[in-house]
Image: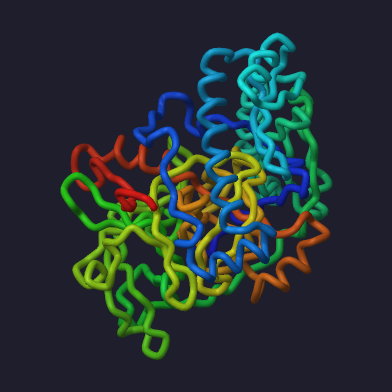
Amino acid sequence: MRKLVARRAAVKAASAGFAATVLLAPLLGSGIASSEPVAPLQLSADALPGELVTALSRDLGMTPTEYLDRAARAQQLRDYATGFRAANPDTFAGAWLTPEGKAVVATTDAEAGKLVTAAGYQTHLAPISAGGLEGALVQLSQWIASLPPAISAPISSIAIDALNSQLVLNVANTGTGHMLNLPTLIATIKVVLSPGGGGPVEYKPMGGDTYITATKDLHDADLRGVDVCSFGFNSTDAAGNALNISAGHCNPNVDDGGPATVYVPNVRDIPNSPEVGTFARAVLGGPASLDYSVIKLNERAVNAGMDQPRVRGAEGTTLTLTGTAEPVTGAPVCKTGQSSTFTCGFVSADHVETQLFTEAGVSKTIRGFASTACTLGGDSGGAIVSGTLALGITSGSNASGAPNCTEANTQLAPYGGTASLGVPIRPILADIEATSGGGLGSGIMVRTKPNAG
């Protein structure tokens, strides 16, 4: 994770009842199409690595079969809700899975609710439509972006709470946070106090999926430090380039768009860490409000297995990917990591926006989803899956400074528990394609197993 302002990773976890249930809507608007089949096949329960099975039982209290079934149910709900919203744009008010796994679609009109019931889904009557809440979020986000950094710094994120028809604004429990005067033109705002802004965070390398990078050559005597992140999804494009999708803020030259070399850390001799690729593209904010990078992998990385459709937890265990998915509130998710290994949770908000500040002091809007999976320092850019489908990459966490998940869960319990910010994979792929100009990244796809089973 790159050392940005502390609130970069400060996302508030929802309660066990998904109090921050949010809109099921395309994060970048309805213009982004998906070529993914309606219900991508997933691996069978007995094909999941033992380490992931342990995490499912420990973190979610689920068997592998329950995990895969609920992940599939979430994508089925997403398909229905997307079509329902297109046909009923003024009455659709959100969709989610309950903690028990029941699929719910909210509407502002009882007649529209009858259509939902007839389709076999539970209904919820809401006073404000999805479009109304999204409009309020845009107003609030624009107001926050206009504030001086010293004033806006305590604000960690904004989420759309469709269940309660309101915006949830997370503010650090500091003097400045208490003095914020929210704009009165935006109604239905709930302010949640989270831990104070904190100070500088030191990140430690992990093994396996960890990489390091720096603004200069590792042998440069003027080099002051390295950035530590994690590889995300192995990918390829139409030209057959071996690529990996990670976090944009992991590129130390993201502010000026320059390239940087990626290394696998040799913890005993960092300057002689082997090169495995170079950042070919890095996005932080911008028109798409995303946080992602494209790493062009070299032959060393390919020979090491980074041309395979899999992500790795600790101790070498791997999970084979079978497709891509979209965030749905209530869907089960798991993330990879060497410090925290496989950890699992639920999507607690599928539409979250946060203002980040780079080291140059530039404000960036990042749009993604929140989950309750514990994420530690160095996990930025790592893979997030739902079932065996690629869901997104890790952008940040409110537990990034904790030494382990046990301590993170204990310390953050009074504030709703651990929370991670993820950037959805499908908008990332769409943005890479749209900005490729027919060059590197054109026709990009996450590497997946052709036939699940």
Q: Where is residue 59 in the image (x, y as percent from the top left)?
A: 67, 62
The extreme top residue here reads 111
User: Is 241 positioned to the left or the right of 410 in the image?
Assistant: left
User: Would you place residue 446 above or below residue 39 in this image?
Assistant: below
The extreme left residue here reads 239
Count the labels in the image: 0
Compare residues 90 and 157 and report the one nearer the observer. Answer: 90
Compare residues 3 and 346 and report the one nearer the observer. Answer: 346
Q: In which quarter of the image is residue 181?
A: top right
Q: Where is residue 245 in the image (x, y as percent from the top left)?
A: 37, 54
Q: Where is residue 402 in the image (x, y as percent from the top left)?
A: 66, 71
Q: Residue at x 29, y 38 (%)?
A: 433
User: Is 87 positioned to the left or the right of 95 in the image?
Assistant: left
Q: Which residue is drawn at 76% across and 53% down?
A: 172
Q: Quadrant of residue 146?
A: top right
User: Is 170 positioned to the left or the right of 290 in the image?
Assistant: right
Q: Residue at x 24, y 58 (%)?
A: 242
Q: Quadrant of residue 189?
A: top right
Compare residues 374 and 262 and report the one nearer the observer. Answer: 374
Q: Residue at x 48, y 49 (%)?
A: 392
- Residue 367 visible in this rendered orientation of the protein: no
- Residue 48 visible in this rendered orientation of the protein: yes
User: Would you place residue 239 above or below residue 182 in this image?
Assistant: below
User: Would you place residue 348 above or below residue 137 in this image?
Assistant: below
Q: Where is residue 238 in the image (x, y as percent from the top left)?
A: 19, 44
User: Would you place residue 74 above or below residue 55 in this image?
Assistant: above
